[in-house]
Amino acid sequence: MDTVERLITSTQELLWDRGYVGTSPKAIQQHAQAGQGSMYHHFAGKSELALAAISRSAAELREEAESALSGAGTAVERISAYLDREREILRGCRVGRLAQDPDVVASEELRRPVGETFDWLRDRLAQVLAEGKANGELAEDLDPVDVAAAVAAVVQGGYVLARAAGSEEPFTHAVAGVRDLLLGKQL
Amino acid sequence: MDTVERLITSTQELLWDRGYVGTSPKAIQQHAQAGQGSMYHHFAGKSELALAAISRSAAELREEAESALSGAGTAVERISAYLDREREILRGCRVGRLAQDPDVVASEELRRPVGETFDWLRDRLAQVLAEGKANGELAEDLDPVDVAAAVAAVVQGGYVLARAAGSEEPFTHAVAGVRDLLLGKQL
DNA sequence: GTCTATATAATGATAGAC
DNA sequence: GTCTATCATTATATAGAC
């Protein structure tokens, strides 16, 4: 892995664990085993490097979610596959955590990949639910856009509850709860 | 308002907007209009002051949630009242945001009030749901603990999605979605 | 491309005068 | 109780040698 690559992946890791505000250029350099001059040669500064890292993490997240949602099975099975995706629960969501960061949200540029990722996710979940309605699997009174947002929110909120508790349990319960509720809409 | 009070409420505001890592003693002093010596006279340091602020925010949150959940109406109406509570959606949850902060989660002491708040909230929501089952309002196959976790997670995740989008819309959709699903369990 | 030197401001305190 | 002085460390770079 070359220096640029190490800088980007190191920044991804540090942003995941400490956020933008909590990640210093020095910490990135140490994690990437790159010198000061090297980092500033390849990137104009912290925010440019962060943009590269955030964009990369966003793309990875979409790819992983898509692989669960485009699998075989009924709509509910595919939503379920998304919910049961392997996750580092106590570490949180590498993209969602950035929505809590004041400097990310304040920057049009840094927030964009974060916002687009969740817009895409809600759309994709809504598509799957709409398919379920279309083929008679799900009740007619289910609103795909609302329920898609609820599913995405349960996952993001599950991370929050789990980290608050210092335990994976709340995440597991929340996911079970929304699946339970969704099954109530199955015909 | 005396100095101690101003220091605590100022820290509450700053923690809400910038988190623990993003809040400096200097920023607190300026916001509270208190001098350096004054702050360090009343509190041993940043973390002691943060503990006071976090505990206060946690207590306020519980009180507000309790007022929605202990109101009149059916179980679903009370859960709904909690979901529709007035919120500063784009500012996020003053307690939940701390669960994303690495230094808060790393500290046994600072994480405790955050964890306890959400433990309490899930318990309280589960009680209301259990009451709904007991009086025949809600279906027997509803798991109160799972659904309570899902409801709490939708709110916390709704904040995340809203901040990511820079719009209140995802929060509103998510809340509508979980209410929609919950109505499916009503008899 | 990478390294070292240098620079300005902020961070998180402590010490002691008043 | 509050103020000012001081301090060591870190944050976030820039400049220029190699």
Image (spheres, coloured by chain):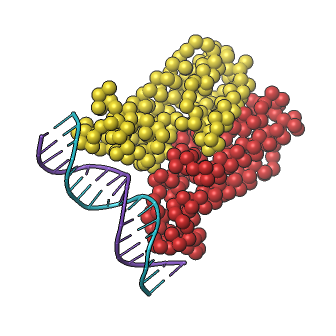
Chain colours: A red, B yellow, C purple, D cyan
| Residue B143 in the image: above or below residue A38 | above
Is any atom of residue B76 visible in this view?
yes
| Residue sitting nearer the eye, A30 or A131 | A30
> Would you say B80 lies left or right of A39 here?
right
- Identify the image quadrant of the N terminus of chain B: top left
> Would you say B104 lies left or right of A127 here?
left
| Residue B59 in the image: above or below residue A156 | above
| Residue sitting nearer the eye, A65 or A115 | A115
Give the image quarter of residue B41: top left
Which percent across, then down, holds residue A75?
A: 79, 41
- Which residue corresponds to the image point at 70% horizontal and 45% vertical from the top-left? A119
Give the image quarter of residue D17: bottom left
- Which residue corresponds to the image point at 76% horizontal and 45% vertical from the top-left? A124
Is any atom of residue A155 visible in this view?
no
Which percent across, then down, holds residue A30?
A: 45, 67
- Which residue corresponds to the image point at 66% horizontal and 31% vertical from the top-left? B172
| Residue B177 in the image: above or below residue A18 | above
> Would you say B68 lies left or right of C17 here?
right
Which percent across, then down, holds residue A57?
A: 62, 57
| Residue B99 in the image: above or below residue B65 | below
Which percent across, then down, holds residue A113?
A: 65, 52
Residue most toward the top? B72
